[in-house]
Image (cartoon, rainbow, N blue to C red):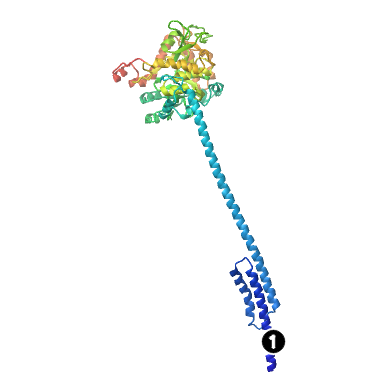
């Protein structure tokens, strides 16, 4: 028994030794595999320890697993570990490649944005260089070597810079945006057909003003009462002062302040606020006329919207350089009162010489019974003509007006005549012309000993630049008779006169204008004495408020306020 026990013990020890040897070989193989792997050795060693620990524990158990089973289990787990080991680097590599691709795209996008910004800066720089060169070329075309301050052919670069510094012109207005030829090709916006259309029943007043608030308010008070006035736009160029509250908040609700940062007479034709109507009545702040007079001119304009229809007439006087003696000739030496043909072309130029044109005042105009221009201090114009003036007026003319604060009225009248084949502006009825009420002003704008000579130069040079002189592309500027009927001077005044009897009142787009046409037909058949009484009554009504405050010259109220008769304008 003892031998058997010893024998058994010996066999058991041998089996244990054999099992331990197998486990050691398996452990060595696993350690070698782990050692040659790229995965972290510490992590692998801990996993191997966990795999072997059940085998080590089993040596103390009564049931011992076979070496084949243990080897198979270790082999299987080792195989699973290999699978996990082979997947981990691939996942890491995929993540790394994605990160690199995203980073590459980000860098490429940043480089593209940087390149685009650089390209934009280059384009802006080139544009500024080219624009400067073009402006310099435009300036070169305006330059003149003459030192005459009244020179109209152009102004030097220093003067242009001074105009810019003094806010007498915009940078964008130093050169034309449209050629004169382009202005000739422009098609005016047509008038809509009646009835009940604002463009054929009302008009917009654009009133120029400067430091004459009392005259301005009196003018607004009067014109706001006219039913034909849709809106009154005040061209306010005074950047140092605001309009008074009585104007800003006028009770009529028709007044709008159009603020300009440039102080120039050109600005009266620059539309900043849109106008509600196509018809524009250009007015000075010191001129009043009865509402009926405005309607008379408006009806005439509606029948000829391409023309300028005014109240104040002037003429040009021609002086031939080849004449011997004083050389002065009126632009129309033949006062032809023919009703059917009253428009004549200029005939003073000779085939062998040039001419100088000069400005003819009202006295010269009425004495010759002929005219060739009107003043926009009271004139109806198509809205498009204001825009064309700003865009297409030859820059020497535009810059001269900005520099000298004069002659914008001559420029506009000649400009429209140039665009209409050299025809003179139309004039409303004589009674409407003579219905003007002038508000008193202490300071005379059109005074001074050099005023006449300056306007002479304006007439001659402007006509040349606008192509309405004898050799001009759109000339010559035509003249027309003023009075056609000695027996009936109150009607049929100026070029292409119309008879109110030929106008159908039912063609008017508003009841107001229908009644007005009928009243003109009735007035026309009255005696001259009755016509004058009617006109006097209308003027009295127009000046009532101004007379009361002493703003009508040579009235008792004026004498009491100013204690001086003043000079006649």
Asked if one can make out residue 561 in the rendered structure from this viewpoint, the answer is: yes
* Residue at horizontal 63 percent and vertical 69 percent from the top: 34
The single residue placed furthest to the right in the displayed view is 68
The spot of residue 308 in percent (x, y) is 49, 18
In this rendered view, identify the residue nearer to me: 43 or 199.
43
The single residue placed furthest to the bottom in the displayed view is 1
Q: Quadrant of residue 432?
A: top left
For residue 343, above or below residue 547: above
In this rendered view, identify the residue nearer to me: 497 or 236.
236
In this rendered view, identify the residue nearer to me: 288 or 330.
330
For residue 176, above or below residue 531: below
Q: Which residue is mark 1?
A: 11
Asked if one can make out residue 201 in the rendered structure from this viewpoint, the answer is: no
The spot of residue 544 in percent (x, y) is 36, 20
* Residue at horizontal 49 percent and vertical 13 percent from the top: 521
In this rendered view, identify the residue nearer to me: 436 or 335.
335
The spot of residue 302 in percent (x, y) is 52, 20
Q: Residues within 10 Å of mark 1 (few under 14, many from 20)?
A: few
Q: Is 237 placed left or right of 20 in the picture?
A: left
Q: Quadrant of residue 78?
A: bottom right
Look at the numbered disc 1 and give the secondary structure of its residue.
helix
Disc count in the image? Answer: 1
Please state, as top left, top right, bottom left or bottom right, where the N terminus lies in the image.
Answer: bottom right
Please state, as top left, top right, bottom left or bottom right, where the C terminus lies in the image.
Answer: top left
Q: Is 1 placed left or right of 152 in the picture?
A: right
């Amino acid at each position: 028994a003892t031998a058997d026990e010893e024998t058994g013990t010996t066999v058991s020890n041998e089996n244990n030794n054999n099992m331990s040897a197998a486990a050691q070989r398996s452990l060595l193989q696993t350690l070698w595999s782990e050692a040659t792997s790229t995965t972290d050795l510490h992590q692998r060693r801990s996993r191997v320890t966990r795999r072997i620990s059940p085998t080590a524990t089993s040596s103390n158990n009564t049931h011992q697993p076979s070496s084949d089973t243990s080897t198979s289990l270790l082999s299987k787990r080792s195989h699973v570990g290999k699978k996990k080991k082979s997947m981990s680097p691939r996942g890491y590599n995929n993540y790394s490649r994605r990160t690199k691709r995203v980073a590459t795209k980000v860098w490429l996008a940043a480089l593209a944005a940087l390149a685009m910004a650089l390209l934009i800066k280059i384009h802006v720089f080139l544009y500024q260089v080219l624009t400067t060169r073009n402006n310099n070329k435009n300036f070169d075309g305006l330059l003149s070597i003459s030192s005459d301050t009244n020179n109209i052919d152009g102004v030097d670069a220093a003067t242009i810079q001074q105009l810019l510094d003094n806010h007498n012109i915009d940078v964008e207005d130093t050169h034309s945006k449209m050629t004169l030829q382009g202005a000739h090709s422009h098609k005016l916006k047509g008038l809509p057909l009646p009835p009940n259309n604002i463009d054929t029943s009302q008009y917009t007043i654009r009133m120029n003003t400067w430091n004459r608030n009392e005259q301005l308010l009196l003018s607004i008070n009067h014109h706001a009462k006219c039913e034909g006035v849709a809106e009154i736009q005040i061209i306010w160029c005074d950047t140092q002062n605001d309009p008074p509250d009585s104007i800003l908040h006028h009770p009529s609700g028709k007044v709008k302040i159009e603020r300009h940062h440039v102080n120039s007479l050109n600005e009266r034709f620059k539309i900043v606020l849109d106008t509600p109507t196509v018809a524009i009545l250009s007015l000075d702040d010191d001129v009043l006329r009865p509402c009926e007079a405005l309607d008379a001119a408006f009806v005439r304009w509606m029948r000829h919207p391409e023309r300028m229809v005014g109240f104040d007439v002037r003429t040009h006087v021609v002086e031939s350089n080849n004449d011997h003696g004083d050389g002065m000739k009126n632009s129309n030496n033949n006062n032809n009162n023919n009703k059917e043909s009253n428009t004549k072309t200029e005939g003073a130029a000779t085939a062998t010489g040039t001419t100088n044109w000069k400005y003819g005042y009202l006295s010269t105009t009425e004495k010759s019974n002929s005219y060739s221009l009107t003043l926009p201090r009271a004139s109806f114009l198509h809205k498009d003509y204001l825009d064309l003036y700003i865009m297409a007026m030859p820059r020497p003319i535009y810059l001269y007006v900005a520099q000298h604060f004069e002659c914008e009225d001559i420029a506009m009248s000649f400009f429209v005549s140039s665009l209409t084949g050299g025809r003179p502006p139309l004039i409303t009825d004589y009674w409407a012309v003579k219905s003007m009420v002038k508000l008193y002003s202490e300071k005379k704008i059109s005074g001074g000993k050099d005023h006449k000579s300056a306007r002479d130069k304006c007439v001659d040079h402007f006509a040349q630049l606008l192509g309405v002189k004898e050799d001009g592309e759109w000339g010559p500027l035509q003249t027309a008779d003023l009075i056609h009927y000695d027996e009936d001077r109150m009607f049929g005044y100026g070029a292409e006169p119309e008879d109110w009897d030929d106008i159908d009142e039912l063609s008017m787009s508003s009841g107001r204008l229908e009644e007005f046409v009928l009243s003109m037909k009735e007035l026309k058949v009255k005696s001259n004495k009755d016509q004058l009484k009617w006109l006097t009554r209308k003027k009295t009504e127009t000046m009532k408020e101004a007379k009361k405050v002493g703003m009508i010259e040579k009235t008792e109220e004026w004498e009491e306020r100013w204690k001086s008769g003043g000079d006649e304008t």
